[in-house]
């Protein structure tokens, strides 16, 4: 269907330049005309790309931008036909004005943002689309309301909500931060709804850097998710950096006590760059001596080999790695130092009223009890996964994860999650929690 829709207009647009060259080929000054046309074509390609990405798309959206560009092509065609073929000119003019008068069918944004393009499944349309923005950085960002629940999407991909998903997003902050020894500086890569950075702000960090690449995500988090993110973007300790998280790490001169990554799924184009050996090496270089890295890894819509590849890659860089399961999500925690904490330390953190308010009646020790694998158990899971072709080391020089993980999207969410967790439980020692909480 995509080919059928795109084939005709792209072929015709591609023919424009060759036809113009043929038009001047018989002239005596052909060299000068070809040079001018080539220069105009090159300059137009550059200006057009920038103008569409940074002017048309943000101001008009892709639907209106396509209409505007289509009308521009039609107008150019009329100008060229006017002096050559009056009959064809009248036909094209009538068609063009007919389209303008009758109008084009409008896109149904509720259908276009329902995630069918991502999960190969549909869900009921939302009661209301509260927010729709397009930009070159994040694509189509939307906030949908179903009943009282607000959900954030990127190109139809679920990014978080203000209901059940808050549990997992708070865990992305509580679980790794419990192991932090010093609270000087933290780096959060990926804003989403802002729930994670809002939870991290309840800890006594001196400074918190937030790296987010999409302005639309920032706008949506500020407008519609103030409650779960606790207004973190207004916290004077939080510094928003509109940049790719990996670039921030490459350029920074800081050392972080915590780096936490709340990114979209690994199969999104470019996301595998944050699951590579080189990226984990970069994180370790930017961590303080006892710093902690946290990274979300999906346990649904993923095959065993792909999950083992992520764990094997991070384990190759960090001597101490643990996998937690909370809110139906996987949480990888890694550090150069042993992941150990005392009950006294956890109790001192819980005495902070703002932190206790984010625990939902639980205790930090209960959250840490959700550990699934670490140490020898994790290594054994990786070794046994070699029977399915063997996990590899993910590097910047291969795109295995980016091309392999989308195959898991055809799986059922709940069945794939339950199957993965049941498999992981067969490797979990009974005393695993006690190995990390020193009494």
Image (tube, rainbow, N blue to C red):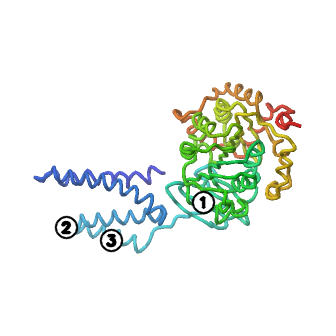
Up-down: is 76 above or below 12?
A: below
Between 30 and 248, the one lying in front of the other is 248
Q: Earlier in the sequence, mark 2 or mark 3?
A: 2
Q: Earlier in the sequence, mark 2 or mark 1?
A: 2
Q: Secondary structure at mark 2?
A: loop
Q: Residue furthest bottom?
A: 101
**Residue that label 1 marks:** 218
From the viewer's perspective, tell me whether residue 379 is left or right of residue 248. right
Q: Residue furthest left?
A: 28
From the viewer's perspective, tell me whether residue 91 is left or right of residue 387. left
- Foreground mark, 2 or 3? 2
Q: Which residue is painted at 65% across and 49% down in the image?
A: 188
Q: Earlier in the sequence, mark 1 or mark 3?
A: 3
Q: Which residue is painted at 33% across and 51% down in the image?
A: 14
Q: Secondary structure at mark 1?
A: helix
Q: Are marks 1 and 3 in contact (CB under 8 Å)?
A: no
- CA gap between label 2 and label 1 equals 52 Å
Q: Are marks 2 and 1 in contact (CB under 8 Å)?
A: no
**Residue that label 3 marks:** 94
Q: Secondary structure at mark 3?
A: helix
**Residue that label 2 marks:** 83
């Amino acid at each position: 269907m995509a080919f059928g829709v795109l084939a005709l207009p792209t072929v015709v647009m591609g023919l424009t330049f060759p036809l113009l060259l043929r038009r001047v080929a018989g002239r005596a000054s052909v060299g000068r005309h070809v040079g001018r046309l080539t220069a105009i074509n090159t300059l137009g390609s550059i200006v057009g790309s920038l103008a569409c990405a940074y002017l048309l798309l943000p101001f008009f959206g892709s639907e209106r931008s396509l209409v505007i560009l289509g009308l521009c092509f039609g107008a150019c065609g009329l100008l060229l036909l006017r002096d050559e073929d009056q009959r064809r000119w009248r036909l094209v003019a009538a068609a063009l004005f007919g389209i303008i008068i009758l109008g084009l069918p409008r896109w149904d944004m509720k259908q276009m943002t329902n995630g069918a393009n991502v999960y190969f499944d549909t869900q009921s349309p939302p009661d209301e689309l509260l927010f729709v923005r397009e930009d070159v950085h994040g694509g189509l960002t939307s906030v949908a309301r179903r009943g009282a629940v607000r959900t954030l999407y990127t190109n139809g991909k679920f990014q978080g909500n203000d209901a059940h998903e808050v549990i997992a997003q708070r865990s992305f902050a509580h679980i790794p931060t419990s192991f932090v020894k010093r609270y000087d500086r933290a780096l959060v890569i990926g804003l989403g709804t802002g729930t994670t950075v809002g939870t991290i702000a309840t800890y006594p960090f001196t400074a918190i850097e937030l790296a987010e690449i999409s302005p639309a995500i920032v706008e949506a988090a500020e407008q519609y998710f103030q409650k779960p993110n606790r207004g973190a973007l207004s916290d004077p300790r939080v510094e928003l950096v509109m940049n790719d998280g990996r670039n921030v790490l490459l350029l920074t001169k800081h050392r972080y006590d915590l780096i936490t990554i709340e990114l979209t799924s690994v199969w999104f184009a470019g996301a595998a760059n944050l699951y590579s050996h080189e990226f984990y090496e970069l994180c370790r270089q930017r961590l303080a001596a006892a710093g902690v890295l946290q990274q979300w890894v999906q346990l649904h819509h993923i095959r065993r080999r792909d999950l083992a590849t992520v764990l094997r890659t991070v384990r190759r860089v960090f001597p101490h790695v643990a996998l937690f399961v909370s809110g139906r999500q996987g949480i990888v925690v890694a550090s150069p130092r042993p992941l150990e904490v005392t009950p006294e330390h956890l109790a001192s953190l819980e005495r902070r009223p703002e932190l206790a308010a984010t625990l939902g009646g639980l205790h930090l020790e209960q959250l840490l009890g959700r550990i699934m694998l670490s140490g020898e158990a994790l290594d054994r899971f990786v070794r046994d996964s070699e029977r399915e072709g063997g996990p590899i080391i993910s590097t910047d020089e291969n795109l295995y994860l980016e091309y392999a993980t989308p195959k898991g999207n055809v799986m059922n969410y709940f069945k794939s999650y339950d199957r993965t967790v049941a498999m992981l439980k067969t490797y979990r020692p009974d005393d695993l929690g006690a190995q990390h909480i020193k009494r």
